[in-house]
Image: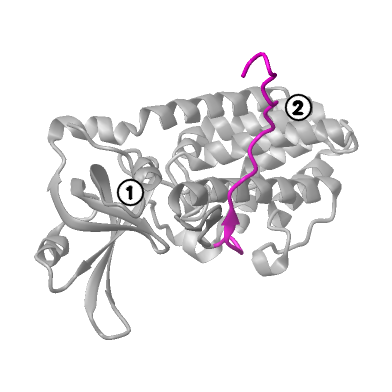
Amino acid sequence: MSYISISSLKEQANDVPLIASVAAQLQSRTVKTTKGGKPYLDLVFADSTGSLGLKVWSDTHLHAEAEKLPLQSIVLLDGEWIQNQWGINGDKISWDLLADEAVADFLAGDPALRRKQEADYAEILQLCGAITDPRLKKLCDQFFETMGDRFRRTAAARKNHHARRGGLVEHVAQMMRSASLVCNVYPELNRDLMLAGVLFHDCGKLWENTYPEDGFSQIHSLHGEMLGHIPLGIELVNKLWRDLLDASEFEAFSKCKPSTEDVRVHLLHLIGSHHGQLEFGSPILPKTPEAYALHYIDNLDAKMEMLRDAYAQTAEVAPGIYDRVFPLSANLIRPLRDYEEAPSEDQQ
């Protein structure tokens, strides 16, 4: 059975209809109406690489089928797809439930993405394993032991960047690579604190943006909706920290400098301030070098992911000028190519 991923569909589609099949899981179904009062169903499908919206109008033959299709159903979407300023639009759409023998492969996720996430997770373990402060190292180990599986199937966001199962691992790994290099440039930064801060800055998303083991629909939890990932992250780190304090082996660190309590508070500050501004959800502004560095590294990686997606998914409105993609603030311009040395006369 031949089909492409949602990310491949977005990369390949343009203003010329693309005939393709996409395997996807029904994530949500919402009844909406246009400004003119015309009703339609807003369907969101997902796979391991991302999500795809599909509008089903009330006067089409698909509407009755869409109303009855159970959430979490895994289907093969056939149609003609085009890309415009509003995103992907499908025409002549039909669907059938994915054959039973193909479901396991679908749930395993895109092979290339799966390999990348496995490599990213291994690098996170390696970088955290190099932390020299035994208290932070044990905290990271405790997190991997108790929350590792959930961490590996959590997204970094519901939309905009790394919004896929395992996306948080990709985000954290890239941030750790950046943080490691930034610490070489700015030696006044506490490397151990930076790496631990990167690991834990979004750990509350394990309740806000997680996925089940057997699907690609993000789970909505009461805690995630009512508290948000920053308070949840602070609560998780405090819980893990208390568990470590109760262990007899932790007594050996009572005379370590800086004090164990100072280390805990500085780590919590990174979680609480990483959005950088009060209006963006941080309860406190950055007040340490590590907090400033973490905020900008986080923002940089999110923006670079948004840019990759935008260039892949939007059309040119003029040569070298791309239509604006939310939440980026302006139309994009085609990036400058790398320098290439002109061929010598002998090579011409």
Q: Position of residue 282 (x, y in %)?
A: 69, 62
Inspect the magenta stretch and tell me whether residue 328 lies in it. yes
Q: Is residue 306 left or right of residue 93?
A: right
Q: Nearer the viewer, mark 1 or mark 2?
A: 1
Color theme of the render: one colour
Q: Look at label 1 and name its amino acid.
A: Ala
State the SS at label 1. Answer: strand
- Residue range in magenta is 327-348
Does 135 appear above or below 323?
A: above
- Characterize the local packing of mark 2: few (<14), some (14-19) or many (20 or more) Cα atoms within 10 angstroms: few
Residue at figure coordinates x 77%, y 38% from the top left: 193
Name the residue beneath numbered marker 2.
134
Q: Quadrant of residue 251?
A: top right
State the SS at label 2. Answer: helix
Does 104 appear above or below 48?
A: above
Q: Earlier in the sequence, mark 1 or mark 2?
A: 1
Q: Look at label 2 and name its amino acid.
A: Pro
Foreground of the two, 289 or 41: 41
